[in-house]
Image: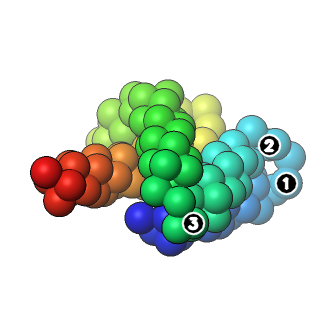
Amino acid sequence: MAKLTIMFGVVLILLGLLGFVATGHHAPTSLIPAIVGVILAALGALANTEDAKKRMLYMHIAVTLGLLGFLGTAKSIVDYIQMLNGRQFPHPIAVEEKAAMAGVLLVFVVLCVRSFIAARRARA
C-alpha cells in the first residue's frame, strides 16, 4: 500500500503542475493538489518500512489526509457535472482540477480502506 500511496502522490503532483500551467502560471492555488501529493508521497515513503507499527501509523495518516482532501473537494464533482450541462463558472479550470483531485482522492481512500479491512481479516 505504501507504493500505491507514492503513486497517488505523484498523480496529484502532476495534476497540480498541469493545473498551474493551464492557468498561465498566475494561480498559485492550482498547486494545492501538488502540495497534497507531496505529503502523500512522503507518507508513502515513510510507510515503506518493515516496522508494522510505523507502516500502520503512516498509512492511517495518509488515508486521513486523503479523506479530508476528498471532503474538501467533493462539492466540485457536482459543480463539474453542472458545468458539463452548460452552467458557467468564473474559473472552469479550477472546477475541473478540484473535481479531478476529488476523484483521485476518493479512489485512494477506497483502496486504503479495502486494504485495511483485508489486513485486519488476515490477522484474525
Question: Is label 3 in contact with label 2 (beta carbons under 8 Å)?
Answer: no
Looking at the picture, does residue 117 appear above or below residue 41?
A: above
Circle 2 sits on which residue?
Answer: 27
Mark 1 or mark 3, earlier in chain: 1
51 and 105: which one is in front?
Answer: 51
> Is residue 95 something that shows in the picture?
no
Name the colouring of the figure: rainbow
Question: Is label 2 in contact with label 1 (beta carbons under 8 Å)?
Answer: no
Number of numbered discs visible in the structure rendering: 3
Q: Position of residue 52 (x, y in %)?
A: 46, 56
* Element assignment for label 1: loop
Q: Position of residue 115 (x, y in %)?
A: 28, 57
- Report the amino acid beneath label 3: Thr
Residue at image position (36%, 47%) is 109
83 and 26: which one is in front?
Answer: 26
Which numbered circle lies on residue 25? Answer: 1
Looking at the picture, does residue 73 appear above or below residue 53?
A: above
Mark 3 or mark 2, earlier in chain: 2
Disc 3 to disc 2, how far (Cα)? 37 Å
Circle 3 sits on which residue?
Answer: 49
